Image (cartoon, helix red, strand yellow):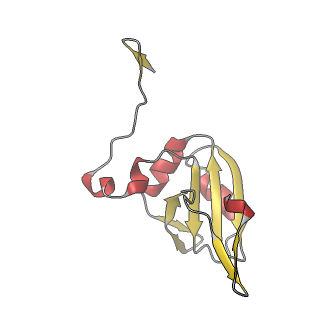
Amino acid sequence: MQVAGRVLEPKRAISRNESRDPAAAVSTSKLYVGSIGDLTDQEMKTYFSTFGTIDEIDVQAEKGQAFVTFADHDSVDRIVSQKHTVSHRFLVPHKHQKRTTPRILKISGILYVTEKDI
């Protein structure tokens, strides 16, 4: 959006309580959902598709978590501001934030930096 020759980026208004959370000011189209238990990707897709167009769902059942990518970041903003129950399971979704520091593993006294985080 341009006004008087300047490029402006509109941002959603946030409450004072949310302003203390560094994730509140971040615009992202990816959602992290932990403690999903035995929820399937179809159950997640059916529920979260009511908030917007879903580009991708990555359910990691062995870790009990899922990542939902939407076409628009407004969907994520609406979701994190509400409480959710899917198939009698209470969920607390968060905005996905990339790690800023690489993950370091120590195996047999040798330090390794994982390729995924480089």
Quarter-of-image position of residue 21: bottom left
**Nearest to the observer: residue 40 or residue 93:** 93
At which x and y percent is residue 61?
71, 73
Give the residue drawn at x 63%, y 55%. Answer: 68
| Horizontal side, residue 73 vs residue 105: left or right | left
At which x and y percent is residue 94?
50, 61
Give the residue drawn at x 57%, y 40%. Answer: 72
Q: Residue furthest front?
A: 110
Give the residue drawn at x 73%, y 87%. Answer: 108
Give the residue drawn at x 71%, y 65%. Answer: 59
Quarter-of-image position of residue 71: top right
Tell how many labels. 0
Quarter-of-image position of residue 106: bottom right
At which x and y percent is residue 44?
65, 61
At which x and y percent is residue 22?
39, 55
Q: Quadrant of the C terminus?
A: bottom right
**Nearest to the observer: residue 118 or residue 36:** 118
**Nearest to the observer: residue 13 or residue 118:** 118
Q: Residue furthest bottom?
A: 108
The answer to whether residue 47 is above or below residue 63 is above
For the question of whether residue 59 can be seen, the reply is: yes
Q: Residue furthest top?
A: 4
For the question of whether residue 41 can be seen, the reply is: no
| Horizontal side, residue 34 vs residue 7: left or right | right
The answer to whether residue 21 is above or below residue 103 is above
